[in-house]
Image: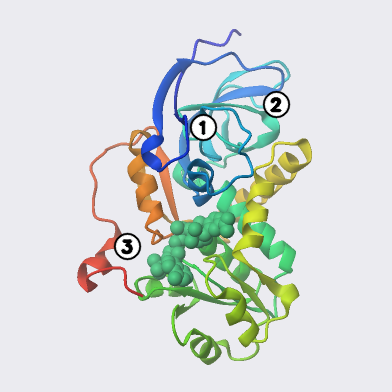
Amino acid sequence: MRNRVIEATWFEYGGYGDADVLQERTEVVAPPGPGEVIVEVIGTSLNHMDAFVRNGKESTWSDDPWPRRSGSDFAGIVVATGPHAEFPVGSHVVGHVRTGAHATHVTVPTSTLVRKPAKLMWEVAGALYLAGATALDTLDQLRIGPGDTVVVSAAAGGVGSIETQLAKHRGARVIGTCGERNFDYLRQLGIIPVRYGEGIVERIRRVAEGPVTAFIDNFGKDGRDIAQELGVADTRYRSSADRREVELSLLRDDPEAVAHGTGQLGRLVQLAEAGAFRLLVSGLYPLADIREAFEDLAELHSRGKIVLATRPVTTYRTIKAREVHEAMTGGYAA
Ligand SMILES: NC(=O)c1ccc[n+]([C@@H]2O[C@H](COP(=O)([O-])OP(=O)(O)OC[C@H]3O[C@@H](n4cnc5c(N)ncnc54)[C@H](OP(=O)(O)O)[C@@H]3O)[C@@H](O)[C@H]2O)c1
């Protein structure tokens, strides 16, 4: 069967900058090559790494040609296949790509895809890859398991909310740092919330009920000092810089890295399907509102993930649950 002509819309940028450098572009896409498919994206999410690469803070890919695209997580439907492609047209898939997922369509090798179970919501599936695989890799490296008491910073955020739940699923006692606005959210997941800021070490000691055995610093502020004061061994501490290495490695497009990333994505899909963690989508924006979505992410107070939808049922915006607390307390103070 011949593939139909497919017109895709994506966001690209021709120089470093804030989200306002992103430009929408629409073109007919080339047919997929051997082993490739075109996926119509239904959901794709934002990660801080997209913004760091776009604003030049992250220089690892500074030799990439311009214009550049953004986005690495997606879920969607296969709409065209190249020769020897593994997934037939109509397959529901979850995938990853080094860059270019903030689009209506992506062309990818089938080695980057896993099947999406019907039970997994599109928005959740489209937000799984980078945050989820970073969480899994970090927990694997630290061998978090029963007997551990682990502290995770920015516990209500994209990576932290998955990391904490999976650590708990592995049998660890989990303490998460956050602002008071997120206490109820973490408690309902079985995570012990502790407010960040002055006096945090004492607050952690009070709830730890024994030694803290591991510390994961997502936020990147005072983590090493706090971990040392708590007596956590260096080998069981992960800094924000370590997280950067994990993320960059998950975004590499050599076959070994892609195989690892897809393997981790497969595990995440299974864990999500089994209910080992629940990924909260606290901001859902139409793809066209990508700049606004990035501004939301940059406030550093999102809960769970911010997702772009290519087929939103409505563009009507309701107040987000995470904003209700701020409306009542008057701001984002910790
Ligand atoms: N080193 C790197 O290369 C690298 C890569 C990616 C991300 N990061 C950083 O990692 C952090 C979290 O990433 P993410 O993807 O999980 O982002 P996210 O979803 O934007 O995380 C936001 C979370 O950070 C929490 N937070 C805000 N201020 C905090 C503070 N002073 N101490 C502890 N937590 C605080 C917020 O909690 P409340 O709303 O309760 O305050 C919110 O739940 C971000 O700061 C990001 O810049 C670093």
Look at the numbered disc 1 and give the secondary structure of its residue.
strand
Residue pushed farthest right?
A: 256
| Residue drawn at x 65%, y 27% as measured from the top left | 87
Marks 3 and 1, how far apart at CA: 29 Å
Where is mark 1, residue-wise?
Answer: 69
Mark 3 C-beta closer than 8 Å to ligand 1: yes
* Coloring scheme used: rainbow
Amino acid type of disc 1?
Arg
Q: Is residue 261 in sight in this rendering?
A: yes
Residue 60, quarter of the rendered image: top right
Task: Tell me the amino acid under the disc marked 3.
Answer: Arg
Q: Nearer the viewer, residue 161 or 79?
A: 161
Element under disc 3:
helix
Q: Indicate which label's residue lies in the foreground, 3 or 2.
A: 3
For disc 2, the marked residue is: 86
> Where does the image place residue 230, in percent across and percent down from the top left?
62, 86
Above/below status of 91 relative to 98? above
Marks 3 and 2 sit apart, C-alpha to C-alpha, by 41 Å
The residue located at (23%, 51%) in the rendering is 318
Q: Classify the position of the C terminus by image quarter.
A: bottom left
Q: Which residue is mark 3?
A: 322
Task: Name the quarter where the N terminus is drawn.
Answer: top right
Q: Nearer the viewer, mark 3 or mark 1?
A: 1
